Amino acid sequence: MKLKKLRILLQSTILSMAFFLTYTNGQSQVLVKAKKIQNPFSKTSVETVTYNRDFLERLNLENISDLLNTIPGFHYTSSGGFVETRFRGFKESRHILILIDGVSLNDPTAPGGQALFSQIPLDQIESVIVEKGHNSVSQGANAVAAVIKIKTIKNKNIFQIGSGSYGSSKISLGLNKPSFGLQAGFQKSNNISSMKNNNEDQDGTMKKNGALRFSSDIKKWKLELKIRHDEIKERYDQIFEPEKDYKSFSQTQIISLKGERELFLNLMDLTLSADQTNFKRSYPEGWPGYKNFEGSNTNFKGEAKLYLSKAHNGVFGFGTKKAAYTNKGLSLSMNHLFYQHKWTKNKVSLDMGGRYENSPQFIGHLSPFLKLTYILKEDWSLKLKGSRTYTPPSLNQIYAQKEPLSSEKIDQFTFGLEKYTPSSLYGADLFYTRYRETIGWEDETRLYKMEADQRDLFGTEWFFQKKVNPFLRVKGFLNITRGINAKGETQDIQGISRSHLGLTTDLKTQKWFWVNNIKTFRHYKTATKTQNFSLIDTSLGHKLNERTTLLFKINNLFNEDYTLKEGYQTKGRHYFLKASMLF
């Protein structure tokens, strides 16, 4: 019944909008093909960080998780196969939405609702786009902190092979044509531990990836079917029980179908998509009741990009999602409608919108968003953003709830300045986030409950990038994040209060390139200690010809001894040599 009402509402809205656009005031309208208009809400600025294929290859990283510490405001900690991703002090990974070709990788059975980043290699990825904050209107509650969009290669045939320290090796193949794509990869490491005073056995990890894609044009519809499988097996030690091996096995399968076409006198681009993702994890030495996890996400959604006039653009969307925790017999269904409008006049632009979500389990909520941009002199611009987001609990939290949980209520405000020129970008953000209602973990019972006390996050972020000459580019950032609760106590815990400084130099000539990445952390607190440490990664590459490139990297150049998460290993100095070939 609810889906029927949603369909009727959608149809009536689109029809009335088309009628209005065509016959307003009895005058004909100037029609502009929607496909010639890019998404009016796409951004290339301090708000958004984009890594294209060329730069990703020069960085020569093995996992997307390794990429995060090069992005302002982000950092990650590893817990076995999981990578817990944090942004500007948000306390859970589920507040960051991870999309691969438009499909969510956030696991509904995971403790923090995070994605298994460690499964995803970089070999077959075309680009990674990170959009910071205030994305919950268009992307949903999981994107309240940020959304990471991963796009795989579609137009290149590529083969890569490499080997390095820790017994690491990898091989991958991608055959990509406009109508068909095949990707496969294998990666392993015999030892992921550099911790001192640990047992001496060879812990390791093994990853397998495979993907198929079919694309076709049928009766003005552009159709695309994708099937993807990723898995990872790991053995690892923890300082909690250093004599004991921990094992994990994780799988992710994705089936997605997407269709696109123009509608209503070419005023609209409509995209319809459906996908299902299955998750499976096992931990033979895990806690009772936490040894096996099986779940899935099923999505159907539509999005219409509207070109109304030179001053007005819009994006309208609808959909339904069902998350299931299969082996615990839990599920959560959500339906949504959203509209986001952009109005531009002279030096001022205004973005505003809202997303309504309802569920049989929780009260429906409207999450609003507002952004004001004003163009100043000398290429400077000022931006003010504000939003409120309601985020329902994850299925893992519902399973382990002490009392009935409700949606978290999160307010965000950002004040930003930036200057953009063809050769440089400078910017600074002041950000403030308040958890008005939040879900907390009770150590005594090991259960979740609603917390009454408010939690505030605030800080600043400074960013620059500059093309020094035709061969050298430099970029850097400083992020300072602090937290405080209602009692005035500093939330000086892991992932909240810290300072993060980053600097990247990118030297590229016709045949050679050299990339250095420096990451410095101050006041990085784990469960037992506060650390100050710096990590330096360097990557050197040489193009043998137009199709073949050799790459050599050293991670953690000075073999820094540090801890990201208490009880889990971090790598020491790590070497890797790789050959990449296009054919």
Image (spheres, rainbow, N blue to C red):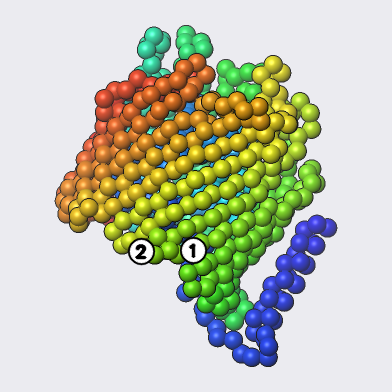
Q: In what element is the residue under mark 2?
A: loop
Left or right of 501, for residue 3: right
Specify few, some or many for label 1: CA neighbours under 10 Å numbering under 14, 14-19, or 20 or more.
Answer: some
- Disc 1 and disc 2 in contact, CB within 8 angstroms: no
Give percent across and percent down for residue 186.
39, 37
Left or right of 450, for residue 292: left
Specify few, some or many for label 2: CA neighbours under 10 Å numbering under 14, 14-19, or 20 or more.
Answer: few
Residue under the point 52% across and 19% down: 527
* Residue 486 versus residue 47 in the image, above or below: above
Q: Which mark is residue 440?
A: none
Give percent across and percent down for residue 452.
73, 31
> Splitting the image into 4 quarters, where does residue 423 fall?
bottom left
Q: CA distance from mark 1 to mark 2?
A: 13 Å
Q: Residue 267 or 374: which is nearer the viewer?
A: 374
**Which three-letter amino acid code belongs to the residue tagged 1?**
Tyr
Q: Is residue 205 visible?
A: yes
Give percent across and percent down for residue 157.
33, 54
Left or right of 445, for residue 240: left
Q: In what element is the residue under mark 1?
A: strand
- The residue that label 1 is drawn on is 374
- The residue that label 2 is drawn on is 378
> Splitting the image into 4 quarters, where does residue 137 fall?
bottom right
Image quadrant occupied by the N terminus:
bottom right
Q: Residue 573 or 444: which is nearer the viewer?
A: 444
